[in-house]
Image: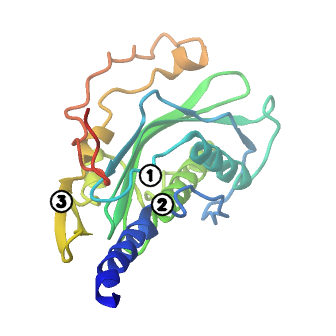
Amino acid sequence: MTRRLSQPMALLASLSALLVFTAFGCSARVKTVTLNVRATHPVSVAPLEMDPGAAKLVAVGSYKVGKYKSKDLRVLQKMLQRTIPMRGAPEESFRIHLVVRSFLIVHSNEKGAGLACIAWALSNPQRELVFDEQFYAARASPPLSVSGVKNRMHQGITKRVHQRAQDVLSDRPLGSPPEDTYDDFERAASRVPDRFKSELPTIFGGSKIVAGQSGEASARRCDRIDWYRRLGFARPVDAPEAAPPEKPPSTLPSSTGYPPPTHP
């Protein structure tokens, strides 16, 4: 009797272990961010936006949870607002506008990673564009949960935006990119493993290895936001027209989730 129950109990314990990394603590949390910057101008933060289809999830041998959602975006909004080094009223201050262009979360039952494309712009009270850039944030670490990956990426994004905003407004050279942020896709993608694997229990005892690609190329954005058009600002005569959008080079891998999808 005891021998017959040992395998189901072991299977249940193994399945429960699959949830430790992914199912619990998947949402980001508001964190206090310490800035290394001297503030000279008041700023405010406009409501954040996310491009349609920006959020992607790859689950390799783990439950399909942890996708970047609107509540995660609200957390980033609160972090940016809480971290403002010199607060100002929206109509009287320089204004930060931020769009999450892509946010990939990939995990197995042993590690996880995130890779995101962020575009942001800085405008003045006269509704003129002062600065804009597009960069990437990336984080991969076995000890961190999905929420931990999101939190670290949020911290890097918050630091970069506020520190560079004050550098621009103070006419200082731009500082080095904060941890977990990168100027280009290649450097950010190098932080994300190409393949993930999970060790899954079998119903007859023992285990099997499930492996899959991370799909980091799906986070690349080849086009840039036309901030004049997006914000409704008058375009200066010497401002170039935005280039037409390009299609990302590849898509996410399919059928990597756990449990396996069912087919009719």
Question: Sequence order check: which comes first, mark 1 or mark 3?
Answer: 1
Residue denoted by label 2: 23
Residue 115 visible in the snapshot: yes
Q: Nearer the viewer, residue 149 or 57?
A: 57
- For this orientation, the residue located farthest to the bottom is 2
Badge 2: how crowded within 10 Å, few (<14), some, or many (20+)? Answer: some
Evaluate if marks 2 and 1 touch, with contact meaning CB atoms under 8 Å apart: yes
Q: Is residue 158 above or below residue 3?
A: above
| CA distance separating discs 2 and 3 | 19 Å
Image coordinates for residue 11, horizontal then vertical, percent: 32, 74
Badge 3 element: strand
Q: In the rendered structure, which amino acid carries the disc numbered 2?
A: Ala
Who is closer to the viewer here, 139 or 71?
Answer: 71
Quadrant placement of the N terminus: bottom left
Picture mark count: 3
Q: Mark 1, residues whose alpha carbon is within 10 Å: few (<14), some, or many (≥20)?
A: many
Residue beneath disc 1 = 65
- Mark 3, other Cα within 10 Å: few <14 / some 14–19 / many ≥20: some
Asked whether the viewer can see residue 171, the reply is no
Residue labelled with disc 3: 211
Q: Earlier in the sequence, mark 2 or mark 1?
A: 2
Asked whether 226 or 94 is in front, the reply is: 226
Instruction: State the SS at label 2.
Output: loop
Q: Is residue 205 above or below residue 122?
A: below
Question: Residue shown at 50%/34% (left/top)?
Answer: 132
What's under tag 1, amino acid-wise?
Val
Disc 2, disc 3: CB below 8 Å? no
The answer to whether residue 241 is left or right of residue 150 is left
User: Tag 3: residue type?
Assistant: Ala
